[in-house]
Amino acid sequence: MKRILIADDHETVRSGLRAVLEGRAGWEVVVEARDGKEAVAGALEKKPDVAIVDYAMPLMTGIEVARRIREHQQETEILIFTMHDSDVLALQAFRAGARAFLLKSDANKMLLAAVESLITHKPFYAGSFVSELKGMVTGKGDPNQVLSPREKTIVRLVAEGYSNKGVSAILNLSIKTTETHRAAAMRKLNINSTAGLVRYAVRSKLVEA
C-alpha cells in the first residue's frame, strides 16, 4: 500500500484529491493537513511515500514544508501543488527538496502520472520551463561546472543585452565563433531561447537582476 499525504487549506481541494488518489488500487491517503505545520507533523508521524503540498498555505509555505520534511524524512517524495506557473517558484521547490511541481490547472491530466513517478523515486517535470529546470536540478546549471570561461563570458554579455555582433566586438571574435560558443552554452544548459539564457544568468548570478 502506497501512503500519501495531502496538504491544502481548502477542504474541497483535499476531498477532490483524496477521491482521485484513492481511486487507484493500492494507494491510501493517510494524512490531510490544513496548514504547513500540520503537514510537517503529519509527514514525520506517518512517513508517507508521497506528500502533495500546496504552495500557499497558512503558517508555512509549501517550499518551507518541503525543506522541513526533507531534513527529517528523506524517504518521502514531495510534490508542490500550486496555481502559479512560475519557473522561479519551480526551481525554489526543487532546491528545497521537492521532486515534482504541478499546476492545479493540470491536475486532471497529470496528477496520477506525477504521483506514479514519485512512487518510483523519479522526478516529474512539467511546464514551459522544463528544459531549464532539468538542467538546474541535475546540477548542469552551475556555470562554473559546465561552461568554459569563454562560454560563461558570452552568456553574461548576452544577458546584459549585447547582440552577437556586440559580443564579438567586445571579445575580438568573429561572429561565427561567438555564435558557436553561444550555441554550445545553450546546449549544455538545455536552454533554447535568449529569454531563458537571461533568466539563467540572473539565477546563477552571472549578472545582477
Image: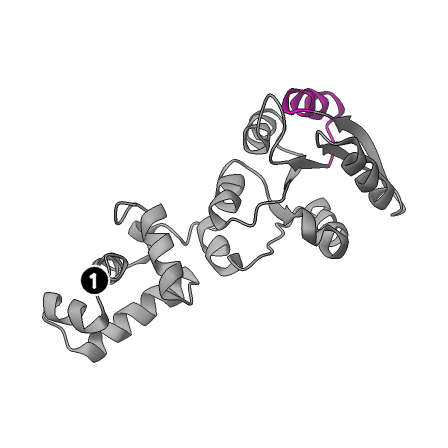
Q: Quadrant of residue 34?
A: top right
Give the residue at x 68% y 20%. Answer: 41
Range of the magenta residues? 35-49
* Residue type beneath disc 1: Arg
Q: Position of residue 143 (x, y in %)?
A: 31, 52
User: Looking at this view, is 78 or 20 the one in front?
Assistant: 20
Give the residue at x 65% y 23%. Answer: 40
- The secondary element bearing badge 1 is classed as helix
Q: Which residue is mark 1?
A: 150
Q: Is residue 44 magenta?
A: yes
Q: Position of residue 22 (x, y in %)?
A: 87, 42
Q: Is residue 1 visible?
A: no
User: Looking at this view, is 100 or 108 the one in front?
Assistant: 108
Give the residue at x 61% y 46%. Answer: 101
Q: Is residue 204 left or right of residue 88?
A: left
Give the residue at x 29% y 68%. Answer: 182
Q: Position of residue 5 (x, y in %)?
A: 75, 32
Which quadrant is the C terminus positioned in?
top left
Q: Is residue 32 left or right of residue 61?
A: right
Q: Is residue 145 magenta?
A: no
